[in-house]
Amino acid sequence: MTPPVMAAPPADPAPSPVRPHGQGRACVITRRATFSASHRYWLPELSPEDNQARFGPCSLAPGHGHNYTLIVAMGGALDADGMVLNLSDVKHAIREQVTAQLDFQHLNAAWPEFDLSQPAGMLPTTEALVLGIWRRLAPQLPLMGLRLYETDTLWADVVGDTMEAFLTIRTHFAAAHRLARPELSQEQNEAIYGKCARPHGHGHNYLLDVTVRGAIDPRTGMVCDLAALQQLVDELVVEPFDHTFLNKDVAHFATTVPTAENIALHIADRLATPIAQAGAALHKVRLQESPNNAAEVYAEVPQIGMAPRALEALAAG
Ligand SMILES: [Zn+2]
Ligand SMILES: [Zn+2]
């Protein structure tokens, strides 16, 4: 009788040649740069009244300014020196292509794409500006994503040379909640939710980031009407949630435990359709409950198992 054939042990992988510093392995790096610039939202084809109605104080002459912060995410394999790129080359490219051209400048006059006397001219919004920066840096650097902060509460991301951009607004509200399932005893709830189950609740100052995705309008430079977006978030979330006891004051949480996850999901459910009606797509809701915990809901793509995206690298910048 033939003895059973034993599976051969797996061969040892061929010893890899010794490479210094992880040479050849992929890594994403980010670089931050800042500049100050002014702009004015004013379309010559509109009357003064229409410009004022459409762009509010952003239409005032001669303009106003922002301290912009740019985050550049780049990816590639490490070289023999242990770097994706030599940072001095990165700094030089960003200075030459972006900050030297924009710092202390009036954006409407700084780059030809913002010349509104031309039919192809576009207002220098955050999303239009970050797209212009992408087009200037992409030939120089292996870009994965760019984020441009106009303020702490408004920023735009692009991940390619298309008209598509992500626009995020940050706001906040204060609210109390209690984490407990009504069918369970106090003891059982405390076993699950700890101190958060105490009977009279406790509060948080919530930070809310709402990210929308859309095509940049070739004339207004906007993914969507920013004032309208802010108004939607104010009316549908901040106003009904701020200074409330969520379990009692927001009907949804009478039957749903208001964990950060459930609040973020409910905010996404409230906003998705109105934002679609305003011409953009709700991409993400991020709700930060404290400096130590936050919940993120991707409204457009599967949350779990999603591929890492350049946007995540930007968030670390
Ligand atoms: Zn502005
Ligand atoms: Zn809590």
Image: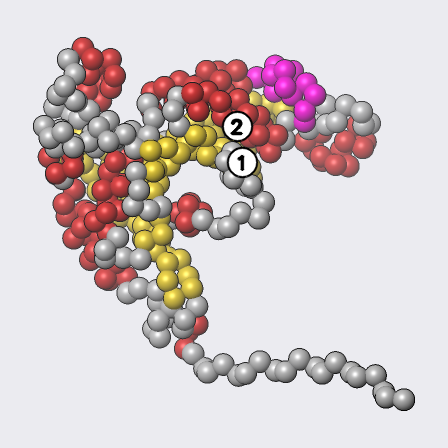
Looking at the rendered image, the quarter that the N terminus falls into is bottom right
Query: What residue is rendered at 18% in x and 10% in y?
Result: 49
The reply, left or right, for residue 252 in relation to residue 130 is right
Residues in magenta, as a range:
244-257
Query: Vertical placement of 296 versus 233: above or below?
Result: below
Mark 1 closeness class: few <14, some 14–19, many ≥20 residues within 10 Å: many
Please tell me which of labels 1 and 2 falls first in the chain. Answer: 2
Q: Is mark 1 within 8 Å of ligand 2?
A: no
Where, by quadrant of the figure, is residue 269 drawn? top right
Determine which residue is flagged by label 2.
268
Question: Which residue is painted at 33% across and 46% down in the image?
Answer: 160
Q: Nearer the viewer, residue 243 or 26?
A: 26
| 74 falls in the magenta region | no
Q: Is residue 290 visible?
A: no
State how far apart marks 1 and 2 are (Cα).
Answer: 7 Å
Observer-nearest of 46 and 92: 46
Q: Residue at x 25, y 16 (%)?
A: 54
Give the image location of residue 5, x and y in percent.
79, 84
The residue type indicated by label 1 comes to Val
The circle drawn on residue 297 is 1
Where is residue 317 shown, x and y percent of the image?
A: 38, 48
Viewer-side residue, 80 vs 159: 159
SS type, badge 2 = helix
User: In the depicted view, which residue is nearer to us: 84 or 238?
Assistant: 84
Q: Residue at x 57, y 17 (%)?
A: 244
Number of residues whose C-alpha sits closer than 10 Å to that of mark 2, classed few (under 14), some (14–19) or many (20 or more): many
Q: Position of residue 63 (x, y in %)?
A: 16, 25
Quick check: marks 1 and 2 in contact, CB under 8 Å? yes
**Kind of residue at disc 2:** Ala
Q: Outermost residue toward the bottom?
A: 1
